[in-house]
Structure formats: C-alpha cells, structure tokens
Amino acid sequence: MKKVVGTFLLALISWHTGVAQSDQKMNRFIDQLMAKMTVEEKIGQLNLVTGGEATTGTTVSTDVESKIRNGQIGGIFSMSTPSKIRKTQEIAIKQSRLKIPIIFGMDVIHGYRTVFPIPLGLAATWDMGLIQQSARIAAEEATADGINWAFSPMVDISRDPRWGRISEGAGEDTYLTSKVAEAIVYGFQGDNLAAHNTMMACVKHFALYGAAEGGRDYNSTDMSLHRMYNEYLPSYKAAIDAGAGSIMTSFNDINGVPASANKWLLTDLLRDQWGFKGLVVTDYTAVNELTAHGLGDLQHVSSLSLNAGVDMDMVGEGFLTTLKKSLDEGKVNLEAINRACRYVLEAKYKLGLFEDPYRYCNEQRAESIIGSVANHAKAREVAAKSFVLLKNANQLLPLKKSGTVAVIGPLANSGPNMPGTWSVSAELDKTSSLVDGMKAVLGNKVNMITHLGSNLLEDSTYQKHATMFGRTIPRDLRKEEEIIAEAVKVAQQADVVVAALGESSEMSGESSSRSELDIPKNQQNLLKALLATGKPVVLVLFTGRPLTLTWEDAHVPAILNVWFGGTETGKAVADVLFGDVVPSGKITATFPRNVGQIPIYYAHKNTGRPYGNSGDFEKFKSNYLDVSNDPLYPFGYGLSYTTFSYGDIHLDNDILENNGSIHASIDITNTGNYDAEETVQLYIQDLVGSVTRPVKELKGFQKIFLKKGERKTVKFEIRVDDLKFFDSALNYVVEPGDFNVYIGPNSRDVKVKAFKLL
Ligand code: NOJ
C-alpha cells in the first residue's frame, strides 16, 4: 500500500513538474514573441472579428484580410471549412510581420453539422455521459472544419422562461447546470487542448445574464451577493474548475456596472478569488454597448473594459481603434495591454497553433467525420432521450405501428426548424421534417397523412420575426378557420392525430423573449378542433422554453415535449411515439401555470408565511388569489411508459459527523410493462441556519435502467461538503443542525428522512 502511495506521489510530483516545465516553456516562448511586438501589434491580438457566416448584431467586420496583414486581428469567428480557414490563416502566416496564427471560433452550441437537441433538451436527459459525448462529437466535427474555439457552454441559470435564451442553458438549477458545464468542457477540450480534434471551450455569459429583469433580453440584473454566490455563480466556477480555457462576458448590467466593464467581476472575483488563468473575451460589441449603458464614449469605455479585465474585444473594435490613444494619454497602462495580449497568445499556444497553424485544416478528416452515420445515430439516441412525456392519459402512448396517423400542425413539415435555435452550422435544407423523419422510420407500416393545420402565428409580422435565419414555415394566406376546417377533414380520416404544435425554433434563443408563454391562440384553436373530432390526439410539443400548458394539460390526453431535437428530430419522435424508445427525459426548468407565477423555481425560500400547498387560497399566507403556488409541472418531472415505485429512504446513520459522510439508499421498482430508464433525484434541506435556506436543493441524481418487474437499490453518499453554503458574510460554511434528505422521481413527489449534522 505504502509503495502505491509512494509511486502515486512521485507521479504527482513529476506531473506537476511537467506542468510547470511546459508552462515555463510557454512563458519563454511568449516572452520572446512579445519582446518583438509593437504596441499596435499587441493591441491587434485583442481584436476578434467575424467571418460573417453568423452574426448576432448590426455591426459586421470589414477589411478583414488587410487587417490580418497589418497584424490587427487576433481571432476570427463564424468562418468554416478547412479551405477557407487555411486561406485566411495563410494571410497571417505568410503576409503579416510576426506570422502570429489566428484563433478560429464558432458558436458550437448543441452540435456542429450534426445537431443535437437544444441545451435545455440536452439537460433533460440528465445523462452527463451523453452530454459529454455530444460535445465530443461537436468538437470532432468542428475541428475537422478548421475551428478550434467553441463559444460554449452557456451556463447561465434562468428561472424566467420569458427569457428566450433559457433554451441555450441547462435550466434553473445550480447543481445540475454545474454538472452539465463540466461535461461539456470535458467533451470539447478532452485532456489535450493541442490535439487536432479538441477545441477550447468558452464559458458564457459571465455573469448573471439569465436573471435579466422581466425576462427581457440584454436587460439589467440587480442581485444580492448572497444569491449570486449561492445560486448563480457556481455554474461558471464549475466550468472553470473543469479547465475551460476561456470565458465570455455578458451584455447585462450587474448592480450598476455592466459585466464587460466590471472590475469586481472580471478581476477580483474571476482572477483573484477563483484563480482563472484563461482568456476573457467580450460578447458581440459589448464594449461599444457600454456607451449606450451610459458609461461614456468609445475610448473611455474601451479603457474601462481593458482595465476591468477584458482581454479580447468581440467585433466592436473599440480596443483596436482607441487603446493606443488611451495608452498615450495615460488612461490605460502597458501592463494591462501586455496582460491581455499574453492571455490571447497563451490560448493560441495551448491549442498548438504556433507549432502548426494548420493543425485544424484537414479536408479528408472533414469529409469522413462531419455528419457521419455514427454521429447521426448518436444524435438520434440523444434526441429521443431528451423528450419529456408530460402527460399520457390511459396509456395512449405508445402508438401502434399500423393504421392511419395524421400529423397536423405548422411544425409537421418544416425541416429547417428541427435543429432548434443557435445551430448555425446546421444544413437546414438537408434536415428532414418531422413527417419525413417519421416516414423514414415507419415505412409503409403506417399510413401517414399530413396538413399544415394552422399558421404558426396569426400575425404575419410576428411570424416573420419568429422564422428568421432560414427557419421558414410556409404561410397559408387563407383565414385561419378555413385552414383549420381543412385540417379537420384530414384528421377525420385517421385513427390517431399527432398535433405538431408550439414554438418555431426562433421563438426562443437570443433576442426572443416572450411576454405570453402559451401555444399561440390560432394553434390552440386548431388543437381544440382536432380534439372535437373525437380522435385520440397526441400533442407533440415543440418549444425552447417552459410554456404555460394549463389548458392543454386539462384537455389533451397525451403530451410529448420534444423541444427541438436537432438533425434527427423526426426519427427520434417516431422512436418514442411508437415505443421503440421509452421516454425518460425530465424537465430542468419549472413549467408555470401562468406567466404571473414567474419567476418560479423549486429551490425557493420558505418565507415567514409559507403556503400550505393545499392548492386553495390561504389568507395571510404567501400565495396568489387567482392561482395556486404550485407549478403545472415541477422541476425534475417527466413520465415514462412504465411506472416506478419508490420505497422509503434508509439512512445508514442519522448523525453526520463533521468531515464524514452518511449514505441514503432507496429501493426502486419498475412496476409497469416496459424496461425503462429512471432518473432518481436527491434533494437536501437545511432546516435551521444563520441565513434563510431553500426549501430543498438538488445534491445528487442517478440514472438507472430497470427491466420490467426489476427492483434496484440506489445509494447516495451525503458528504459534509454537500451541506455547505455562503453565509451572510460570504464565507463558505456548514452549520451543524437538522437537515432533511428527500429522494424521488422529481422535486415534488419525494420521500423524506431527517438527519443531524454534528
Ligand atoms: C452573441 C451571443 O450572446 C453569444 O452567445 C455568442 O457567442 C456571440 N454573439 C457570438 O456569436
């Protein structure tokens, strides 16, 4: 045993020495390079421009080639293919004075060419292995296409589904989002950033972007430090601790200082407290936007941003055009420019670009890997596992593979909407629609008929905004009633109706906030008409966020929420609807009953006048006159075709010693008729504290597979670390006293057991 420890220690020491040596080698290389650089060339490295394939603002980069020649560009994003990237890299290597390679970024968010479900759907799998694999495949494809920097993971916690970008993250929970963040970082970066098939991750949006007031995009955030530290910051920290090489500042104001000029955030917290050693880049023109925030003119805000700790300026060129002047006028110092330049050069060094600037440009690899059959198969598997069965009355699902199925609705025949928002590298014209995907799986076993049913939205201007970037849905110019009447005739010929309704992909994502979260009224009218036929109706719901489905839940027998499942959506929907895959997804953001309940999240505080959960109004309690406090579907909720029964929690000890751990176990039995997966969730509540604590917090989960009739014991370790939190002085503490542990299939339907921390 001793020997093993000894060997391990030696290995550790030599590993550390190895790391230190490679750091020294990198530092020497960068020292030598920087010694040759002019101030202008250093400032040039801080300039990140767009290659124009996808833009998220009104400013677009110009004169890119001549700027590369002049050493005025450090990085380019939204450019792809090995040939284009090689050609651009050649300008830097052959025509610029110092031949510094360019770093190439891209929004690789949920897949690259092969698209996986939107991140909110990915999180609903609760399967960190699969999420990591999806990021690995995305990195394999993107790096084969010349790209070495992914603007992902997005780890912004959001408890406000009005915010369209809730679709891009893992939902409302701190613990789960942190786990997803780690999985994605590992997936992108692997264990060697310099390998030709790994890429640098970029954690975003730092920070608190998901807490925008009123759910309106780019809006301000005002939040106590206590809440930040306990609830909103840990997911960024988790991604950094997992080794993420870069971080992106957010657009929003934080307690009066916008993130991109926030020295407390970017230096005191990120660098000094958290020890982050990677690259800090802004979001799109976020430096310029500091002027509209009211912080001053471009020169001033650029100096503020650099001094706050930003290294690279995305698209706006405030750094490029003003930092030299600010240096001459003493508004910034050379150390700050050197610091920023060093972080950019280090990122390039770690990616191996100084060794081989064309490392990521390999046409053959691109051809064999991008969109491969294996990648598509994985995307189909992940998509099916992301779907959440919200309701299944009388076991309407799964459907029989026979008879006539009518697939009706504005999402039935739109391939370009299937990949979902923020899938800039998807091949929209080659993505199958829901109907085509389903036909490919079912062949002629099922007679499939289809109809538009209704427009996506009655208002054509709204529909235009909701179908941007090629995500078209054909528009029928007739009156909605006429379209619906025709669709009803199609439904009448079928044995079962699949209503493909909800949002288009661009109704969520950036700049797609909504004030109403229902299925658009004209689509609801279609749904009512379909139900009135008396045919069994399955609602296949497309959405990038929790919607308010109170009416649907009361009237539609089966609801399968499929988010936007990516390239293989259609096939995956067929897999689940017809029972080849048993649904196992669980929501990671609470579904409210109405918009007035927002913000709504399971880990809320008790208040001094807690509501008794009776469902009825209680005078002088913290509740609403017109709606219960309960959500429609709680965090962690999702049904299966089978049923699971949970036994009681057994604790191996109800006293937890400081520094020790105890174990909670529970028996789970598959009591239904299908072999299936189940995600078992563990929550903890700190009953008495020096500060108020949430009613429960997720602290563990396990995904298990149970054959029908099978029983398994699931065991969780509860460690003292799981009970820690930031107190009112922001010390990370654990306070002895009484706790509850809850285990269940979701955050509501849980078993409970008490324990004590000494
Ligand atoms: C703006 C978005 O907020 C961010 O997520 C994205 O990475 C950049 N644009 C670059 O496209």
Image: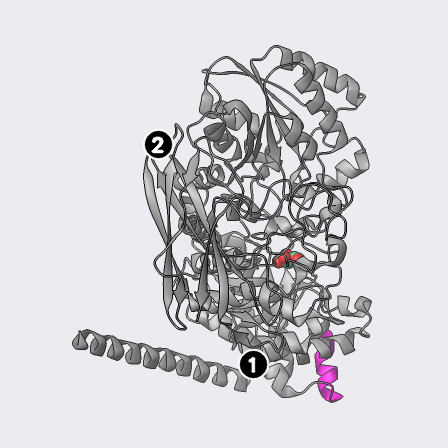
Residue pushed farthest front? 619
In the image, residue 328 lies in the stretch drawn in magenta: yes
Query: Does dot 2 land on a helix, a strand or a loop?
Result: loop
Q: Which mark is residue 642?
A: none
In the image, residue 234 lies in the stretch drawn in magenta: no
Quadrant (top left/top right/bottom left/bottom right) for the C terminus: bottom left
Disc 1 beta carbon < 8 A from ligand 1?
Answer: no
User: Looking at the image, is 495 positioned above or below residue 596?
Assistant: above
Q: Amino acid at mark 1?
A: Asp
Q: Which residues are magenta?
A: 321-331
Determine the main secondary structure of the stretch shown in magenta.
helix
Dots 2, 1 in contact, CB < 8 A: no
User: Looking at the image, is 127 positioned above or below residue 670?
Assistant: below
Nearer to the camera, 758 or 379: 758
Nearer to the camera, 721 or 144: 721
- In this rendering, would 325 be left or right of 582? right
Q: Does any portion of residue 377 appear in the rendered image?
A: no
Q: Which mark is residue 708?
A: 2
User: Looking at the image, is 708 positioned above or below residue 149?
Assistant: above
As measured in the structure, the alpha-carbon distance from the residue carrying label 2 to the one carrying label 1 is 53 Å
State the image coordinates of residue 391 (x, y, percent, origin top left): 56, 31
Figure colour scheme? one colour
Q: Which mark is residue 272?
A: 1
Q: Amino acid at mark 2?
A: Lys
Please name which of the two marks, 2 or 1, marks the residue nearer to the observer.
2
Would you call the spot at circle 2 few (<14 residues within 10 Å), some (14-19), or many (20 or more)?
Answer: some
Q: Does any portion of residue 373 appear in the rendered image?
A: yes
